[in-house]
Amino acid sequence: MVKNILVIRRDNIGDLVCTTSLFESLRHLFPHATICAYVNTMNAPVLTGNPYIDRVFTYTKSKHRQPGQSLFGLYWQRLCTLIEIKKQRFDTVILANPRPCYHSLKVAKTVGAQRIIGAAIDGEKAITHPFNPDDFFGAHQVEQVHSYLRVFSEPLPVIPPNRVFIQDSSLETVRTRLPNLSPDKAIVGIHISVRRPKSRWSVEKYAELIHLISQHNPQMQFLLFWAPAKADDIRDVGDERRATQLMELCANLPVYPLPTENVEELKAGLSLCESVICSDGGPMHLAAALDKKLLVFFGETPIEHWHPWCQCYEILKPHNAVSESISSQQAFKSYLKLSHD
């Protein structure tokens, strides 16, 4: 009998968003079970307010430690969390990455789970229900993660939408930062931050697209999102500078800046939008989980595995896999198609 389930997902925001449907299906399969998650502190807000999860355990990656926080303190805190998880006596652990993950398996072994479900690892027998590549169905990350439910149910349950939930306090905070935003006019979200350089679209083209949309619909408002972090590449001007440039290029238009320090703020801001224009990555998956219309620039990321998991989206991916090759006119045509869906 399944009583206590721990789902481990250690990677990025988009990966965890693509796992939210798994939690919902687990709750429907095991309505009386305790269902918990073990995730990192950066992506944990993806699960805030999720009614299908009883508890979220977190750990901090060393690269995310706070100023003044020692490595010893970080690892001590992580050890204390693992001890607390072990006390819960989880009978089932799902390594929710459809690719082999040694670190997640190490956690599962540490907490002493009886049943460990995950991608097979050569020479590793601790995974009681190993999944080889042929055991996963579908090409998309969401489908492959959902495949783990084959251990409990054949046929597989219908996959529900990915969902994220907005806290009233976060929404109120965001609205307070946008006093000039009209509640009666539609909003297009523009998110310029992207981890993969080949997926980045230039500020100049974003500005051209915003002008084209405004000419088409003078009542449209725009929210400009970016993550105000230092660029990893010293040659990169950074998103703070890009955002400033974009605001200058759209100075006569209703474009409102909304830098977001964390996932909670980003979720709340995206929830205000009718549609979102961005590159592939975490913000795209959050917007999809909020059921927003999406226009997305893809670089080298495989579309079949990472496209938005929602009903209404348009993807632009040039043959050379460099998003900058896409013109503002091409993007505008896709936007018009999207807005009429």
Image (spheres, grey):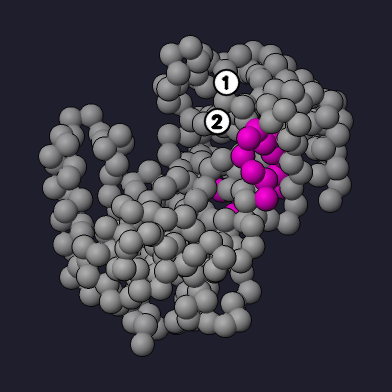
x then y, percent, for residue 152 = 48, 81
Residue 227 among magenta residues: no
The structure residue drawn at horizontal position 67% and vertical position 50%, both measured from the top left corner, is: 304
The structure residue drawn at horizontal position 70% and vertical position 44%, both measured from the top left corner, is: 294
For residue 196, which numbered disc appears in the image?
2
Magenta extent: 286-304
Q: Mark 1 = which residue? A: 243
The structure residue drawn at horizontal position 75% and vertical position 36%, both measured from the top left corner, is: 316
Residue 300 among magenta residues: yes
Residue 3 sits above or below residue 337 on the image = below
Disc 2 residue type (three-letter): Arg
Front residue of this view, candidates 124 and 231: 124
Which residue lies most toward the front here?
A: 123
For residue 31, which numbered disc appears in the image?
none
Which residue lies most toward the bottom here?
A: 1
Q: On the picture, is 87 further left or further right than 239?
A: left
The structure residue drawn at horizontal position 83% and vertical position 29%, both measured from the top left corner, is: 330
